[in-house]
Image (spheres, rainbow, N blue to C red):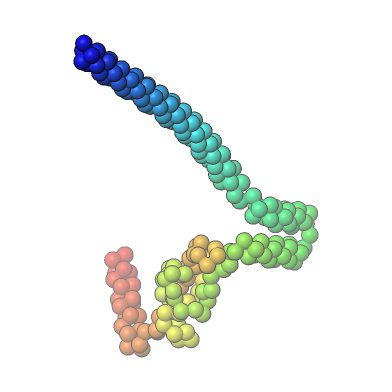
Amino acid sequence: MGKKTDQKDLEKDLNNQESDQTDEQMAEEESADEQLQSQLAAAQEEVKTHQEQYLRTLADMENLRKRTQREKEELAKFANENILREILPVIDNLERALEHADQGENGDGLVEGVKMTLAQFSQVLERFGVVPVEAMGQVFDPALHQAMGQMESADQPANTVVQQMQKGYQLNNRLLRPAFVMVAKAPAEPQQQEEKEKSESETDNQLNDSE
């Protein structure tokens, strides 16, 4: 009788232990589930925050692009404002010179006025970094000069600029327009000159005969 009672008590204790273990497992599972839910909610909130930051950054970049484009357009539109403002007084002086000429004043005054205006124009260009290209008497430089032809010269060495047909200009040491020049070449030898003149004479005679 006593053994049966002990066995029942032992079975009861085992059942109680199993029940306690099941409760603990369920509690642990519930705790783990709650922790996962909490981590998931935190991750979703972080994703939402990053998405909002991304959208704000994207909007800021678009606004910056539009503002930069507007500033670029404004700069291009008024880039020459300073130099044009400096040129206006030069135009005023030219107009005054023409008015004096129309009023019948002597030509000396007109010439002097034009010279002063030209000097003023040169000063304006120089303030903006525009300077004339040195040409006369210089060795021909294809980077600065454009040869329009050659001229025989006994006074200047060959390949020297002996005539300037149009001034050239540089802008801050960069070529703006080349100088149009004539370049010296050695004079023809007397014999060559005679042959050249003879050939030209024969050509003239042939033309006269044909007429």
11 vs 129, left or right, is: left
Query: What residue is rendered at 44% in x and 76% in y?
Result: 140
* Front position in the image: 98 or 81: 81
Residue 187: where, in percent of width, then height?
40, 84
Query: What residue is rendered at 47% in x and 69% in y?
Result: 144
Query: What residue is rendered at 75% in x and 55% in y?
Result: 96
Note whether residue 119 is visible.
yes
Query: What residue is rendered at 39% in x and 24% in y?
Result: 31
Residue 141: where, in percent of width, then height?
44, 74
Quadrant assignment for the C terminus: bottom left
Note whether residue 166 is visible.
no
Residue 199: where, in percent of width, then height?
30, 78
* Front position in the image: 178 or 174: 174
Work out which residue is located at the far bottom of the displayed protein and give it. 190
In the rendered image, the vertical position of residue 94 relative to residue 119, given as above or below? above
In the rendered image, the vertical position of residue 26 relative to residue 133, given as above or below? above
Residue 72: where, in percent of width, then height?
55, 44
174 vs 158, left or right, is: right
* Front position in the image: 175 or 194: 175
Quadrant assignment for the N terminus: top left
Work out which residue is located at the far top of the displayed protein and give it. 1
